[in-house]
């Protein structure tokens, strides 16, 4: 596929009526907001946008390709949430049941009555693990879930919510493993990714490594006063700092381009995928996509009903609210209509759907920005797609 216009070299497909999405994408590249990126959208189960462009690797100049894939950080949580909700729809997992019914060791530390839904909605008080842990231990699964089973909650479960930035994946993932006998990456692959033909991995095979786009960490401007402010909010001793680097400080920012990290299963943070797979996954939750629908209307309603209230105790007291694993619309996140849902990832990636508009989108990129719930790049693309969907 060749460039779609004479501006920044945007490649791929845009259906008639969705041209403004291509323009917004080109704007992101031309302005320097994006170095390399991809965006896709489905409308009522039909793919209407699938575009990519820019530079994948700034050290080699390699361009972003149709089959490029990239780490999407917490956008992975949407895939893990889907696994749990799929089990709930099948009757294999009761969201109101105590976690200890499925994972008996979890009852330690006064956690015997914590229900599964508290894990998915960030209400369990287990946003970090006390003590230190090596990267090797963090990538080995068993040391982390054993530590979480022993951990005493940092707040009374259910009394507030605070973003479980990394521990979410091991908590929800271990429940999935206890119910199915499969790791989260294997369950996701066999039950969701393969049936939908998604290029989406939680635990990336080595054969896929040549297609991976390295992420470009966010850098503060030279001489910026933001460093002192960031340390105050995100330093190693803060709640957010401990949550982001959990377990035990092992997941520092510089590890995310390592092959070992992509190969492991960190179901809150290390999914590797492309935009079209994100859009297709969310499209299959809100309607039929090429004959497949993953969640029925009843489970979708349960999954996207807001379970949290008030400020997020880990994310700067921001108005970021959750259903059963998905972010839902709030005063801070105003994408789409009242029933919109999805999940953002650190740096800017997102998978999002608006059931009432019949719209599902995916956005991935390599240059990380500072936003916690998207930024101007994804917002401009979603709004352009939403406007087009409303007029077609």
Image (spheres, grey):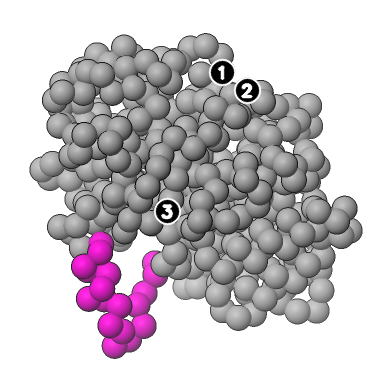
Q: Is residue 115 above or below residue 261?
A: above
Kindly check if marks 3 and 2 are in contact, taking CB atoms under 8 A apart as contact: no
66 is within the stretch colored magenta: no
Q: Mark 3 — residue?
A: 319
- The numbered mark, 1 or 2, whose residue comes first in the sequence reads 1
| Residue density around tag 2, few if under 14, some if 14–19, many if 20 or more, within 10 Å | few
Write the residue at 40% across / 19% down. Answer: 96
Front disc: 1 or 2: 2
Residue 36: percent from left, percent from top = 58, 67
Q: Is residue 177 visible?
A: no
Residue drawn at (51%, 51%), measured in percent from left and top? 330
User: Which residue is labeled 1 in the image?
Assistant: 89
Q: Quadrant of the N terminus?
A: bottom right
Q: Tag 1's secondary structure?
A: helix
Residue plotted at (14% across, 25% down): 109
**What residue is pinned by disc 2?**
298
First-in-chain label (3 vs 2): 2
Q: Which x, y percent locates residue 75? A: 49, 47
Is 246 left, or right, of 291 in this rendering?
left
Mark 1 vs mark 3: in front: 3
Residue 237: in sight, yes or no? yes
State if disc 2 and disc 1 touch (CB < 8 Å): yes
Instruction: Report if residue 231 lies within the magenta region.
Output: yes
Q: Is residue 29 above or below residue 341?
A: below
Please identify the residue farthest to the bottom as the structure is shown: 223
Instruction: Please state the horizontal and vertical placement of residue 293, each as a whole percent of the image.
Output: 70, 27
Instruction: Name the residue rendered at 20%, 38% in the picture.
Output: 155
Spatial CA distance of label 1 from label 3 is: 29 Å
């Amino acid at each position: 596929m060749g460039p779609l216009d004479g501006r920044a070299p945007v490649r791929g497909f845009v259906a008639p009526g969705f041209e403004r999405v291509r323009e917004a994408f080109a704007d992101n590249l031309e302005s320097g907001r994006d170095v390399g990126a991809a965006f896709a959208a489905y409308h009522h189960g039909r793919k209407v946008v699938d575009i990519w462009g820019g530079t994948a690797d700034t050290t080699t100049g390699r361009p972003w390709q149709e089959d490029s894939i990239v780490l999407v950080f917490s956008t992975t949580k949407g895939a893990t949430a889907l696994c749990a909700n799929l089990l709930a729809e099948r009757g294999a997992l009761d969201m109101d049941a105590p976690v200890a019914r499925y994972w008996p060791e979890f009852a330690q530390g006064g956690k015997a009555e914590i229900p599964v839904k508290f894990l998915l909605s960030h209400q369990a008080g287990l946003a970090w693990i006390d003590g230190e842990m090596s990267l090797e231990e963090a990538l080995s699964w068993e040391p982390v879930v054993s530590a979480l089973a022993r951990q005493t909650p940092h707040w009374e479960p259910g009394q507030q919510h605070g973003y479980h930035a990394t521990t979410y994946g091991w908590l929800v993932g271990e429940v999935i493993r206890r119910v199915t006998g499969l790791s989260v990456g294997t369950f996701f692959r066999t039950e969701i990714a393969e049936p939908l033909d998604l290029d989406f991995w939680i635990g990336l095979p080595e054969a896929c490594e040549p297609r991976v786009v390295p992420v470009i960490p966010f850098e503060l401007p030279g001489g910026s006063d933001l460093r002192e402010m960031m340390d105050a909010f995100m330093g190693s001793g803060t709640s957010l700092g401990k949550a982001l680097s959990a377990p035990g400080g092992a997941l520092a920012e510089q590890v995310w381009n390592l092959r070992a990290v992509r190969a492991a299963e960190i179901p809150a943070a290390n999914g590797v995928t492309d935009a079209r797979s994100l859009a297709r996954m969310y499209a299959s939750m809100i309607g039929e996509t090429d004959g497949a629908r993953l969640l029925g209307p009843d489970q979708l309603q349960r999954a996207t009903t807001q379970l949290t209230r008030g400020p997020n105790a880990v994310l700067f007291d921001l108005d970021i609210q959750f259903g059963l694993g998905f972010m839902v619309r709030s005063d801070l996140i105003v994408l789409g209509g009242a029933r919109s849902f999805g999940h953002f990832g650190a740096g800017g990636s997102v998978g999002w759907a608006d059931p009432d508009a019949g719209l599902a989108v995916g956005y991935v990129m390599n240059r990380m920005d500072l936003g916690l719930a998207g930024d101007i790049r994804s917002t401009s693309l979603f709004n352009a797609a939403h406007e087009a969907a409303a007029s077609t």
